[in-house]
Every structure is written in C-alpha cells, then in structure tokens.
Image (cartoon, grey):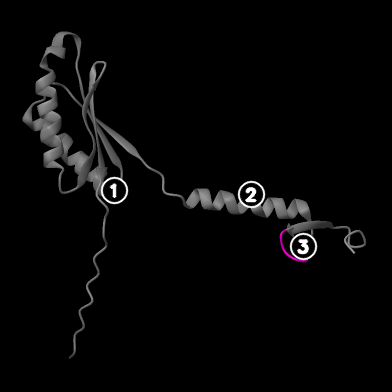
Amino acid sequence: MAEELELDLVMISDKADPPVCKIIDYQKFLYQLKKKQKEIKANAQKIVVKEIRFGPNTDDHDYNFKLKHAENFLQDGAKVKAYVFFKGRSIVFKEQGEILLLRFAQDLEEFGKVEQLPRLEGKRMIMIIAPKGTKKKTDKTVNNQ
C-alpha cells in the first residue's frame, strides 16, 4: 500500500502485539519532529547570570547603587554573580572584600538566597545569589453589593 501511495512505511511501536506501523511521508515526519523539539527548546527557561563588580574599598553610594541594580536583576529572575576584584597589592584586604560580599548578601536576603558563599579564585572573590521562588499571590475578594 505504501508503494502505491508513494509514501514510507514507518514502524511506530515494535513492542506492541501486533507491531504498529504507519504509512506517512518520512521526511515530513522528521521535519515535524525537529520542529517540535525546537519549540520545546524555545519554551525552556533560560538562566541569566548578571555580574556586579566591587572593589575592596567600595564606597557606600556606589554600594547602594549596585545593590539597587542587583535587586532589579533578582526580581526579573536572573542570578547575580557579585565579585570583589583585587588589583595589585589590594589582595591584602581579603577580609574587607569578604565582609562586603556578606553584607551584600544580607541586604538582598528578601530578594534572593545565597547559592555560593564568597570564595577566592585568583584575584577575585566570588559569590552567587539566586532569586527566591516567586509565588504569585491572587486576591479573590468577592464584593456582594
């Protein structure tokens, strides 16, 4: 029958009794399969990582400015990678950099949770903060008037 219709005989399930076969255009079938996989991939949630850079002696105004940006990033659902970059001999202020990052994590406590505590990697001390699961609140108030 498949040859008469100039189509392909495709085995769908060989474990069934009797085996299930279908007469279809195989190229069209592959195209639709690829299209479905592409659609699933497009709908998948992508993780965005935003970076915020500090110096070991970052001033309060700069700190607050970067804190506001980090809050916005976390509310948008992006992870925040905060790091203190030590230039030259400023590596002697490691403790100061760690205190700065821990303060940063404490200030962002209501927006996100610490995924990775401050850790020194070369000349950078890195900390990663992930957004908290956003629960959508729905108000179901009924006005009986």
Q: Eyeballing the image, is 1 above or below 104?
A: below
Q: Quadrant for residue 14, please give it.
A: bottom right
Amino acid type of the residue tagged 1 in the rendering: Asp
Dots 1, 3 in contact, CB < 8 A: no
Q: Which residue is mark 1?
A: 76
Task: Tell me the mark number nearer the camera, choosing from 1 and 3.
Answer: 3
Residue drawn at x 14%, y 13% as measured from the top left: 90
Amino acid type of the residue tagged 2 in the rendering: Lys
Mark 2, secondary structure of its residue: helix
Choose between 18 and 115: the one closer to the eye: 18
Prevailing SS of the magenta stretch:
loop
Q: State which region is magenta.
A: 15-21
Image spot of residue 91 (x, y percent): 16, 13
Q: How far apart are the two marked residues, 2 and 3, measured between alpha carbons?
A: 24 Å
Mark 1, secondary structure of its residue: loop
Q: With 5 as the anchor, is 116 left or right in this view?
A: left
Task: Decide which of tag 2 and tag 3 comes sooner along the chain.
Answer: 3
Residue 57 seen anywhere in this rendered image of the structure: no
Q: Which residue is mark 3?
A: 19
Q: Which residue is mark 2?
A: 34
Q: Is residue 73 covered in magenta?
A: no
Residue 128 seen anywhere in this rendered image of the structure: yes
Graded by Cα atoms within 10 Å as few (under 14), some (14 to 19) or many (20 or more), the crowding at tag 3 reads: few
Image spot of residue 92 (x, y percent): 12, 12
Q: How far apart are the two marked residues, 1 and 3, measured between alpha carbons?
A: 50 Å
Q: With 26 as the anchor, is 47 left or right in this view?
A: left
Residue drawn at x 21%, y 44% as measured from the top left: 113
